[in-house]
Image: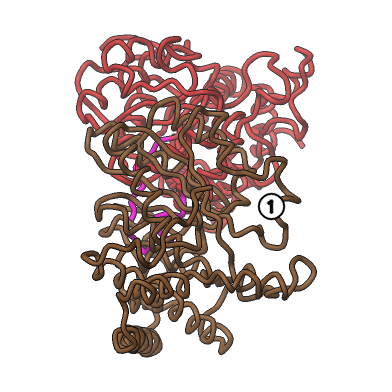
Amino acid sequence: MATITYRDALNQALREEMQRDDTVFLMGEEVGVYQGAYKVSRGLLEEFGPSRVVDTPIAELSFAGIGVGAAMVGLRPVIEFMTWNFALLAIDQVVNSAAKMLYMSGGQTPMPVVFRGPGGAALQLGAQHSQALEAWFAHVPGLKVVAPATPYDAKGLLKSAIRDNNPVVFLEGEMLYNTKGEVPEEEYAIPLGSAEVKRAGTDVTLVCHSKTVAVALRAADRLADEHGIAAEVVDLRTIRPLDVDTLVTSVRKTNRCVVIEEGWYFCGVGAQVVDELQREAFDHLDAPILRVTQADVPMPYNKLLERAAKPSPEQVLEAVRRVAYLER
Amino acid sequence: MTAATHSGASLDPTRKAFYHGLLRQMVQLRRFEERAGEAYAQGRIGGFCHLYIGQEAVATGAISALRDDDYLFASYREHAHALVRGTPARAVMAELFGKATGCSGGKGGSMHLFDAPRHFLGGHAIVGSHIPIAAGAGFAIKSRGTDQVAVCFFGEAAVNIGAFHETLNMAALWELPAIFICENNRYGMGTALERAAAVYDIAHRACSYDMASETADGMDVLAMYEVTARAVERARERKLPTLIEARTYRYMGHSMADPIHGHYRTKEELEEQKARDPIEHLTGLLREGELLTDAERDALRQSVEEEIADAVQFADESPDPEPGALYTDVYAD
């Protein structure tokens, strides 16, 4: 198995799906000549030409709409947003058009479009470039929402997203592009809607996705070393549809749970996870479920303040000590 | 402005059937909307219902210049566009009634009519949101190398949104086979165009994007047909977009829930505009050219009356969607 970056795994997924199906095309700012703002589309213009790797002006709302229209008449657009912060300009097309077209047409208009790009905070990019918006999109019926944590998942999930006949919001981690992992040479795809146990354990379930998987895994290492606690790390991978079965199975085993996410606390992804677990696993819980999220503030620029705002292994450790009643 | 140059004498007698088709179409739209208005007043149609009365020449003339496989996108004032495209009056009326037999299965309503097999792709109720969507169909046509055209109908209030400008820029930059037809009925709800736009001539906005544009008399169905035919040729043969401004007028309020006149326009203005009625205009031309007899006119009206009465009865008697329809069509397989 080759060890490649998250960026190159996404690039492979795009290349393979564009080779496999000539209705797939990539559109967005700087995807072609510039090779991608984050180099995810490196080499694709050269291989597929300008009619399938389409550089756009800065016009998020309308190139998202062009994707919606192209999907309605039989193409499979992959619309790249330079970041999901900028995609807020296009939310009308994602929420009002893409998510509802099938329903309000009584089933006549499938919408096989992928909206993708990096989300979450990087380093000192300030309040307007640092948002994790999974919860915004996951709220909307008609959308699927995916946020992979590893190169293996990124490739397998993007391939499934492109083949899906529904609009998929695909949130990549800006800080994950350079991370490396093993990706098989042979063809594979990961079904949307399946969580994965990234590390097995018996004492507490750490629910996470995207960048917070690394946070949870670091916390799990320290829990084992410092407290002898065996944490089970469950990576949601897909936010909607949510794989409740895997969550419930884990919590039935561990009886304790901490949910970690990069987004904000209020109405966050974790709020939904907690809701599902209190109904489906109430009798199996030995402690209230706690959440670790970004601080409930716009992201500050200052390095120390920014660090304090982001979910950290230390915060996870503290939450685990509390659900294990090691600390009040 | 492209003048309404037609006179009765200039009509081509060999095209009598075509003219009669246009007349019947406009009468059908008028009677459909009048009966829809009645049904709304009786509470048989819910929600918002935006009638097209007064604007019949625009959809009739423009869509008559298209091929059946060209793609159509329209705003929420779109009963007419579906009907001209050929969606049966029964299916459109049943959709307004929210019935399972409606063209969107009762789940779209007046503002979300769809008929995908006839390439009628909505029914979009966020002002101007379908302008980029139509350009997306144009992008797909160009990408596939076919010779269809994507046509988008929207009101004049939509030209002030960002997506209008973003889309015209990309459509011109990428040379998309798209036709943008602005139905300028002079009021965005109750706001007159001159109170909302710094530039009165909407067609002039195409200059910003080096796009072809024309202004047409939207009360003259033959003018609408001709201006659209020129845009179709430009799109089909040369893959170039066009912006058409159709100057028209709506006789009713913005929606059935809104006043017909009042603070924003006078009754006198309305009556003055009705003197330019598109149905009367074409009827006058045909009479002048001796291409329409009283008997032909009466037969045409009678056949429309029967068609619309049948549509209302069909809608009335059709079943509501099954309760299970609530949860279908959220996701495709």
Type of the residue with mark 1: Leu
Locate residue B167, reporting x and y percent: 50, 35
Q: Please report the bounds of the magenta region as a residue range.
A: A99-114
Q: Output the letter for the chain in brown.
A: B
Q: Quadrant of residue B17?
A: bottom left
Front residue of A43/A316: it is A43
Please report the residue visible at 76 percent of the width from the left and 29 percent of the height from the top: A298
Please report the residue visible at 60 percent of the width from the left and 29 percent of the height from the top: A86
Regarding residue A234, the answer to whether it shows in the image is no
Regarding residue B327, the answer to whether it shows in the image is yes
Q: In this view, does A305 lie to the left or right of A312?
A: right
Q: Quadrant of residue A168?
A: top left
Q: Against A260, is B28 above or below?
A: below
Q: Against B121, is A324 above or below?
A: above
Q: Chain A: give its colour.
A: red
Q: Against A189, is A268 above or below?
A: below
On the rendered image, what quadrant is the C terminus of chain A found in? top right
On whether residue A111 falls in the magenta region, the answer is yes
Please report the residue visible at 66 percent of the width from the left and 41 percent of the height from the top: A290
